Amino acid sequence: MPPAGSVGRSNPISTNVSGIQIFEHMPRLAKIMDKVTILRSIVRSDDYYSPNICDPQ
């Protein structure tokens, strides 16, 4: 869990997949969560850069 005070006021909501909750402002996504893939990180070994990819290296 993030430190107290570091997150805004929002609550998680359950999805149609047991054990997975998401941001409360995404109710349509919650209904189709069994049809999506969750990517927790993306790593590339070349020098390619895209503003849509967060590369912590």
Image (spheres, helix red, strand yellow):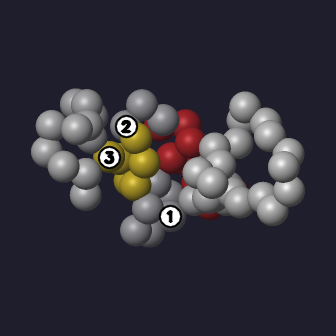
The disc placed on residue 12 is 3
Task: Name the element at disc 3.
Answer: strand
Q: Which mark is residue 35?
A: none
Q: Is residue 33 left or right of residue 12?
A: right
Residue occupying image coordinates x 32% and y 46%: 12
Q: Is residue 48 visible?
A: yes
Residue 51 in the figure: left or right of residue 29 = right
Residue 50 percent location from the top left of the image = 79, 36
Marks 2 and 3 sit apart, C-alpha to C-alpha, by 5 Å
Kindly report which numbered mark, 2 or 1, lies closer to the viewer in this rendering.
2
**Residue at left 54%, top 47%?**
31
Q: Amino acid at mark 3?
A: Pro
Depth check: 16 or 10 in front?
10
On screen, 39 above or below 4?
below
Q: In the rendered structure, are the residues bearing label 2 and label 3 in contact, judged by CB atoms less than 8 Å apart?
A: yes
Question: Residue 55 vs residue 24: left or right?
Answer: right
Q: Which mark is residue 24?
A: 2
Label 2 or label 3, whichever comes before in sequence order:
3
Residue at 81% over, 62% down: 45
Inspect the image, locate mark 1, and give the three-letter code of the amino acid beneath it.
Answer: Val
